[in-house]
Amino acid sequence: MRIFLIFAMVIFMVAATFSQENANAKANAPAQGAAVNQENALAITDPQQIVSRSKPDVQKFALEKLFMSYTIGGTAWSPDGKSVAFISNISGRRNLWLVSTSGGSPVQITVSDQRQGSPAWSPDGKWIAFISDHDGNEQWDIFLVHSAGGEVTNLTRTPEIAETDPAWSPDGKSLAYLVKPKTAPNWEIDVMDIGTRQVQHITKGTPHHLSVANFVWSPDGTQVAYTLENANGKDSNIMIADVATGKSKNMTNHKGDLHFVVNDWSPDGNSLLITSDAANSYQNIGLMDIATQQISWLTMDKWESRGGNFSPNGKLLTWTSNVDGNTDVMVFNIESRSTQTLPLKKGTNTLGGAESAFSRDSTKLLIYHNGPDSPSDVWVYDLSSAQSYAVTHSLAAGVRGEDMVEPFLAHYPSTDGKWQISAFVYMPYNLQRKPENPAIVYIHGGPTSQTVNAFDRAVQYLVNQGYIVIAPNYRGSTGYGKDFQEANFNDMGGGDLQDNLAAADWIRKTGYVDPKKLIIMGGSYGGYMTMMGVTKAPEVWAAGVAIVPFVNWFTEIANEDPLLREIDLATMGDLVKEKARYEERSPIFFVDKIKAPLLLLAGGNDPRCPKSEAQQVADAVHKRGGVAELKIYEDEGHGFSRRENQIDAYTRVANFLKQHVPPVALSGNAKAR
């Protein structure tokens, strides 16, 4: 798996008590809130309901200008609540910036050619810790810089060991972080004394099939709670480790495969905020009493939620609720057991902050808003006034949000009748309902990930040029419960491929699509799906675009990061015993079936899908006289972080598609600007 996420997100509230040995928890009195009926949300969509909206003055996008819209990464409150540290590529590189919480122009704190991430502000306000790797190789080091800027110090200096997710101890004297040697199959937790630079191993010797996923400090700094997850993606536990001794206790002993994820530790030290599918096979929110290990469920929904934080004053807590790709931020009053959905614009609204989304005085929340017409920005929500405002403005000047396309949310049945598949459908403006237009099946990576109602530069550019896009959440995606997420277990490239082929069939029925102009495109696992599509259903596709793909399970497992190797073996089976399955699901062995021209893009330092994967399929296609354009970005990893490489990559995509599957000229579109 290229991305390993053990949960997604939801809505409705109930209070209940749950013992880990009993998965059949019963709900008691509901807290204030509204239930969402998933079955209604997943009603089958008639393709004829999809329409191209009229907009006479829509502007053509210039790709370079669209990609000048900057990206927002991790954020952290200053202790006094007056500033926010954030990662952004405003300069063309993902570096560390500061902005006032009252707004204004951001100030660059670090200047580096390498990407940075995960800022964490020290409790005394003097220092910001962050991570950086080299040319996308994911061998992260932890760095320290004064909050006013200046010299940067590399705290770890371990080119063969990755350290990530730094978190300050409550007293500010130590940093905890995740650590993984390049040859190791799992993450552990270390703590560094900032004064002496001495390192203590909090966890060590973890079995190869288990890995630490995340952790939180206890309020007194004597313990850390962490999530220990199984490589198969089906099971995880919450552990508490004593910092002085390194001894860990399992807080969620259970039978069967269940997920338990720790999110935060209450200010009084008595409770953990958790996310788990133990109640009803969907990710729900609970409060665990540490003394008794009993769980009081705050949600019992059949969508998915993700836990957030306790407020520093202990009165509130947060989570996010993902309903079919649209995400809301929820605030729960612990005393009244009432829930508020924050009044934010529709799209993907998530919680920011390093140790917490709450400001230290508990009066404000740091939030990301991301929607189809606006890239992710940092917002501040004032809890007393119920007002929110943006402190970053990432959409490039001269690019109009009103020219972006709002997608339709559609649902279609899987071909085997087992599932209903959710998909976002992007329709260019001003199309006639004639079967003459090209359409792209745009496949997300993971596979444990989800296409959500968020801004996508590549999608918006291609739609603006006249390409219809359908982005399905095929079986194996997050966001739709445990059974759906595990439905491609030991079947990667099987049922999930059929779900993506069904997307192509469904979009044709809208009446807008020329069946000879279907394109398949995706990145990472989506790149693998692209290659499976052009080899297993070659007659369907007019072109294929595979970005950082893998194509050969045997070479992928041999060359990928050891942690990903454990995940792949756990989800696809033993290489020897299941050799026939691995062969049948490896596109490289079916290159002779390919009919469509291919564009392949790869990163030279990719530890997840090594560049050799794209290279071998390009070589095989060329040997047979086929069309396979290949570009390897030697200074990138799994995806492209340098702006000039992003522009080059998607210029190649646009030119390739316009050459092989040109769009119909659109009426009403003004010139690019």
Image (tube, rainbow, N blue to C red):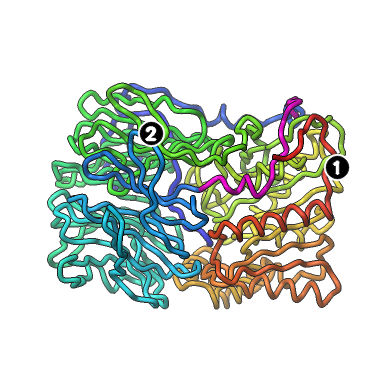
Magenta span includes 32 = no
Q: In the figure, residue 554 lies in which quadrant?
A: bottom right
Q: Is residue 372 left or right of residue 306?
A: right
Decide: is 39 above or below 132: above
In the image, 134 versus 35, the foreground residue is: 134
- Give the magenta-colored segment's residue range: 52-70
Residue 40 placement (x, y as % from top left) = 57, 27
Q: Is residue 186 left or right of residue 399?
A: left
Q: Residue at x 80, y 36 (%)?
A: 509
Magenta span includes 69 = yes
Residue at numbered disc 2: 300
Decide: is 550 above or below 447: below
- Name the chief secondary structure element in magenta: loop
- Residue 379 is marked as none
Q: Residue at x 21, y 39 (%)?
A: 360
Residue 100 placement (x, y as % from top left) = 33, 39
Q: Secondary structure at mark 1?
A: strand
Label 1 Cα neighbours within 10 Å, binned few <14 / some 14-19 / many ≥20? some
Q: Is residue 293 left or right of residue 30?
A: left
Q: Residue at x 29, y 67 (%)?
A: 153
Residue 630 placement (x, y as % from top left) = 72, 68
Which circle's residue, 1 or 2, is located before the other in the chain?
2
Label 2 Cα neighbours within 10 Å, binned few <14 / some 14-19 / many ≥20? many
Name the residue type under label 1: Asp
Inter-mark Cα distance, 1 to 2: 44 Å
Residue 268 placement (x, y as % from top left) = 13, 41
Residue at numbered disc 1: 514
